């Protein structure tokens, strides 16, 4: 079987004149994409930055950034993700901390003086994409060579150092092995009709990519799309209008959106006719409320195929196929899907580590070549249930349980109860400090369109009928929108700050 690099280059060479990526309603061909990649690679080669080099990339959803990511992966270098959406001072501080020898970014990010100064002070090579001169790839003036000492140049065998979303705390950078990432791309072929070792070819149909490149799913989808020879419609960010327009124009059969985006689609009143071409919807990044899947099916007659993965897993390790959904959704309601081929799972007691029987809730452990060591179990922080058919249910995170006076509150349970209220579209629950009890749960929620907000007392009564007394939040907040990470998950630290500020 060829390498992932072989697969990428093989697809690029099949028909260079064929359209590859649509961005901002303009198509870039496979040949044009390959030429951009070659120019980026040439500049790094000339600067003496070979395979294994750590390459800082100011991440933006853009066709030129996609080309940079493809070149870095295909040349066996290492992507070091830099969040281009951060304020200037925070992005500059991260660049200084990473000490990469080269930084790649769009021209608009190079116009940020504080950021540019940080790169110069570090003595990095600067590569600009899409400058005003019309040149797609060029060196940044004043940053034409690598200078200075102290760079952490090499990460052999690592394909990406991915900055986590920071949903539950301070973001951290997670190194992913190139072998694990390639295995994840190989395993994902089942969803594209691609078999392991299959010769490169172009496939019919367009894949919509709207997940942010600052999240692993965005990067993974771009690489997987190209490895599969699939045309791509790339959106700068998810919006209901942009997503719906892409579905209509390309007559998509399958479209991905985050769970929060799917709720927005429902709430915006997108019609069944708007989505007439679709056969199914896909989602990931967070567990899905089974009622959301049911609501989408009832309105649009569309199955919702979710998957489960994490940055540490180098992609998804479980998910639904359309055939499985049609056959078993009612029976397996609420599952994130079936374990991918080659993935083994077990559920263990959080305290003793003893393996639990099928159907019991405990900590999820996984074993797969995709995780880097096929012989060892990797413990996650997710509470889960596994059945005898290898279907998996995620029940929340063990490490964000709220300990209220010695009683453990799982936010997932409270969110599920809140979202069963007819007025509530989406809810999130966090713990805040309490002098007497240690922590207490509080809840924020978004109303359904045209709904009237229930009073706190009404919510207390509603929840006491569905939860134990210690699980009921002590405070509620109705918000127009949650603070979110780039992957559109609710940012728990920022949500906690809202409650602390309002206290």
Image: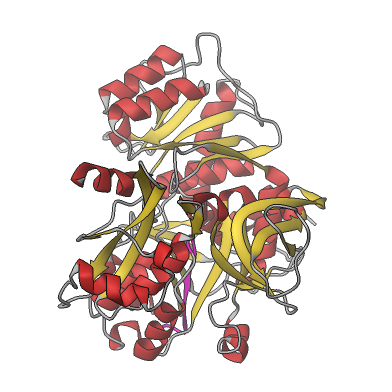
Q: Which residues, given as a range, are shown in magenta?
A: 277-286
Q: Image quadrant for the N terminus?
A: bottom right
Residue 464: give x, y in percent of width and height. Answer: 36, 74
For this view, does 317 lie left or right of residue 485? Answer: right
Residue 386: give x, y in percent of width and height. Answer: 68, 71
Q: Residue furthest right?
A: 375
x 50%, y 35%: residue: 40
Q: Image quadrant for the C terminus?
A: top left
For this view, does 489 lie left or right of residue 45? Answer: left
- For residue 400: magenta? no
Q: Residue furthest front?
A: 436
Image: 162 above or below 398: above
> Between 496 and 128, which is closer to the camera in this rendering?
496
What is the quadrant of residue 435 in the picture? top left
Dominant SS of magenta comes to loop
What is the quadrant of residue 273 in the picture? bottom left
x 36%, y 24%: residue: 92
Residue 9: give x, y in percent of width and height. Answer: 63, 51
């Amino acid at each position: 079987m060829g390498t992932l690099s072989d697969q990428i280059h093989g697809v690029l060479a099949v028909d260079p004149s064929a359209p590859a990526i649509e961005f901002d309603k303009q198509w870039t061909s496979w040949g044009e994409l390959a030429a951009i990649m070659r120019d980026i690679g040439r500049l790094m080669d000339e600067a003496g930055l070979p395979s294994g080099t750590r390459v800082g990339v100011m991440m933006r959803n853009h066709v030129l950034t996609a080309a940079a990511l493809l070149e870095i992966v295909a040349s066996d270098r290492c992507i070091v993700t830099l969040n281009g959406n951060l304020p200037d001072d925070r992005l500059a501080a991260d660049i200084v901390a990473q000490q990469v020898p080269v930084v790649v970014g769009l021209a608009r990010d190079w116009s940020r003086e504080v950021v540019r100064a940080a790169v110069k002070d570090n003595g990095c090579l600067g590569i600009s994409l899409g400058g005003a001169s019309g040149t797609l790839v060029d060196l940044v003036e004043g940053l034409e060579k690598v200078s200075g000492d102290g760079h952490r140049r090499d990460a052999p065998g690592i394909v990406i150092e991915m900055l986590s979303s920071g949903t539950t705390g301070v973001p951290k950078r997670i190194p992913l092995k190139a072998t694990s990432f390639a295995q994840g791309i190989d395993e994902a072929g089942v969803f594209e009709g691609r078999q392991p070792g299959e010769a490169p070819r172009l496939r019919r149909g367009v894949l919509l990519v709207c997940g942010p490149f600052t999240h692993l799913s965005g990067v993974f989808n771009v690489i997987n799309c190209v490895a599969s020879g699939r045309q791509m419609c790339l959106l700068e960010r998810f919006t209901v209008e942009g997503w719906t327009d892409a579905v209509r124009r390309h007559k998509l059969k399958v479209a991905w959106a985050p769970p929060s985006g799917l709720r927005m689609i429902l709430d915006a009143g997108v019609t069944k006719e708007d989505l007439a071409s679709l056969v199914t919807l896909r989602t990931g990044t967070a567990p899905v409320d089974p009622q959301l899947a049911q609501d989408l099916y009832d309105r649009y007659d569309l199955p919702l195929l979710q998957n489960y993965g994490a940055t540490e897993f180098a992609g998804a390790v479980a998910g639904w196929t359309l055939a499985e959904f049609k056959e078993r959704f009612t029976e397996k309601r609420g599952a994130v899907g079936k374990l991918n081929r080659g993935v083994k799972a077990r559920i263990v007691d959080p305290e003793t580590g003893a393996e639990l029987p099928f159907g019991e809730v405990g900590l999820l452990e996984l074993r797969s070549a995709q995780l880097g060591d096929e012989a060892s179990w990797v413990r996650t922080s997710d509470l889960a249930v596994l059945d005898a058919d290898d279907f998996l249910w995620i029940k929340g995170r063990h490490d964000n349980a709220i300990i209220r006076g010695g009683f453990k509150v799982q936010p997932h349970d409270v969110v599920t109860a809140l979202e069963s209220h007819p007025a509530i579209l989406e809810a999130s629950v966090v713990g805040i400090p309490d002098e007497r009890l240690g922590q207490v749960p509080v809840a924020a929620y978004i109303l359904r369109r045209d709904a009237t907000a229930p009073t706190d007392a009404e919510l207390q009564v509603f929840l006491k009928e569905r939860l134990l007394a210690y699980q009921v939040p002590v405070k509620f907040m109705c918000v127009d929108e949650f603070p979110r990470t780039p992957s559109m998950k609710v940012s728990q630290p920022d949500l906690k700050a809202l409650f602390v500020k309002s206290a």
